Image (spheres, rainbow, N blue to C red):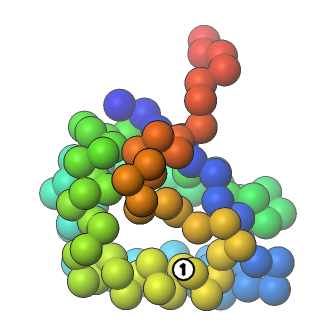
């Protein structure tokens, strides 16, 4: 399944956000792949971040990562950089952007 997400980086933390993503922990990327993600791309336009994930089951992905120690640390780091963070709540699986049009 393809999932699109929208988050926002703080204007004063753009460089730190991009630097962090050059150093994503290998343990985290391995866990993301093990949870069924084939690819995850993030684009930035100003402070808007657009994520596109190809995964087997987005709800399963969230459940696998929510309490994983390396992800908890990563999300704490991201919380310092983001105005709008990724949502791991029970409703998080419904937080993806709705499809408006496809070709």
- Write the residue at 16% across / 57% down: 34
- Write the residue at 52% across / 62% down: 86
Quarter residue 32 falls in: bottom left
Residue 73 appears left or right of 28: right
Q: Provide the residue designation for mark 1.
A: 78
Residue 35, relative to residue 97: is it above or below? below
Residue 30, relative to residue 101: is it above or below? below
- What is the residue that sits farthest to the left in this orientation? 34
Residue 58 visible from this viewpoint: yes
The percent coordinates of residue 16 (x first, y second) are 65, 87
- 31 or 96, nearer to the observer: 96
Residue 57, relative to residue 76: is it above or below? above
Q: Callout 1: 10 Å neighbours few (<14), some, many (20+)?
A: some
Q: Quadrant of the N terminus?
A: top left
Quick one: SS at disc 1? Answer: helix
Residue 38 visible from this viewpoint: no
């Amino acid at each position: 399944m393809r999932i699109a997400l929208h988050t926002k980086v703080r204007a004063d933390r753009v460089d730190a956000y991009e630097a962090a993503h050059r150093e994503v922990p290998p343990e985290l990327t391995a866990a993301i792949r093990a949870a069924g993600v084939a690819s995850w791309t993030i684009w930035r336009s100003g402070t808007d971040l657009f994520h596109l994930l190809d995964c087997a089951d987005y709800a399963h992905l969230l459940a696998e990562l929510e309490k994983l120690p390396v992800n908890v640390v990563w999300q704490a780091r991201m919380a310092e950089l983001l105005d709008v963070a990724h949502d791991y709540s029970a409703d998080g699986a419904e937080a993806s952007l709705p499809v408006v049009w496809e070709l």
